[in-house]
Amino acid sequence: MEKIVILGAGESGTGAALLAQAKGLGVFVSDAGDIAAPYKEELVAHNIAFEEGQHSQDRVLAADEVVKSPGIPDSMPIIQVVQEAKLPIIAEIELASRYTQAFLIGITGTNGKTTTTHLTYHLLREAGLNVDMAGNVGSSFARKVLENKHDYCVLELSNFQLEGMYTCKLDIACLLNITPDHLDRYHGQMAPYLQAKFRILQNMTNQEHFIYNRADPNIQAYLQQQTMLPCQHPVSVQEHNAEVDDRLSLLTASNFRLRGPHNWFNALVAIKVAQLIGVEATKIQAGLTTFAGVPHRIEWVTEVGGIPVYNDSKATNVEATCAALRSFAQPIIWIAGGKDKGNDYTILQPLVKTRVKAMICLGKDNAKISQAFRQVVAPIYETTQVEEAVAIALALAQPGDVVLFSPACASFDLFKNFEERGECFKQAVLHARSAQKINS
């Protein structure tokens, strides 16, 4: 019996364990931390051997193959040991792809992956296709493959997942953009990050389809070095030709709700996927009309005293915040900050100078981000409390302004993740609205 060891027992690892066991593999799950109760209960219920709080080297090295959860960096000692032993290390996506016949649509990029994945899934589902989504969003791909209920699957793929994919072949691959992010994982180097993203094309032939951002210089430069590529479909919001204008007309007619040119680009990618699969224009338009967006991505929260408030907690890098700032014509009261990832804030300065009338820095250490904008916006406030940040923003806002929470930084200084950060922000805003109603 082939033995497989799974490192990490979150959604990805547990899904991989369940699938591997169902396919007759000997499975052992190892997690250096505490396994969350729901996943531990699943492992116990299926009699899958596991350990937590450690990685037992002898048990890990007894494997024929290792499945690494995407959050585990190669710098981890156990990964170094496995690499030295020359054991194959794969991603859960790679494992799952071996056991499915579904039509696979993969979506990656530095920004916009989740919105585009959800929208693509929404368009296909609303058109009546038997489709699901997985990967870096929602349930693990392995869990979906184990259920074996769908003809199509839309996969959001992070660079971490792509690193561990080798034989997986997508039917449609989408590459939205590539800008500096997660460079701490690549020793500050852009080249390996770029290479990881382009692994989405591996094993594809001219029978498959590649949708990409024509305006992205990193993508363009990389493509010029390639000789073997799938059928290419460049997309750009600025481009005008019969095909692009047809897609833009669908967007316009649908009263698409999402703000900003970046979301129009995301929509054009999703529309192109639907068209390649053969979805009728009327069904695409209907799906665009009913798509409400994804939480924490320029998400309208409410109005407080006539001031619209938006939650963009998912903006964990400068480029995402850049897109958010471009999405509003009104003067912006901007709440930003968090754990800096080596950000270069200079590209934001022109936008901030012309669009932001006040800034509130929310983080444990606001020195770098506040200093970056001292010369382009005033006033600037600093706080470590989300409630105080909201209170300051609403006190500063005047009719015609908008409050935008778009951090440009990671969340790990004050919060567990960007979802918790966004939920805390929304709760603070709703509390402020309730308090205002009581006092009025």
Image (cartoon, rainbow, N blue to C red):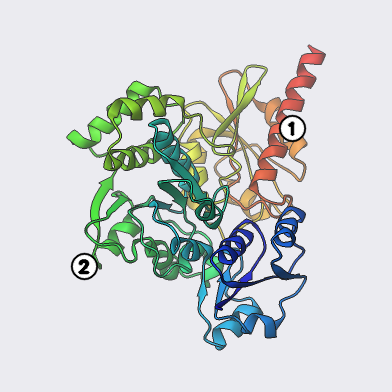
- Position of 216 relative to 287 (above/below): below
**Where does label 1 land, which residue?**
428
**248 versus 360 height, above or below:** above
| Residue at left offset 77%, top offset 20% | 434
Looking at the image, which residue sits at the far top?
440
The residue labelled by disc 2 is: 227
Assign a secondary structure to mark 1: helix
* Residue 361 appears in the picture as rendered: no
- Between the C-alphas of marks 2 and 1, the distance is 53 Å
- Give the image location of residue 28, x and y in percent: 66, 72
Image coordinates for residue 88, horizontal then vertical, percent: 50, 79
Q: Quadrant of residue 32?
A: bottom right
- Name, please, the residue furthest toward the left: 242
Q: Is residue 375 left or right of residue 209?
A: right
Drawn side of residue 234 relative to residue 102, left or right: left
In the rendered view of the protein, which quadrant contains the N terminus?
bottom right
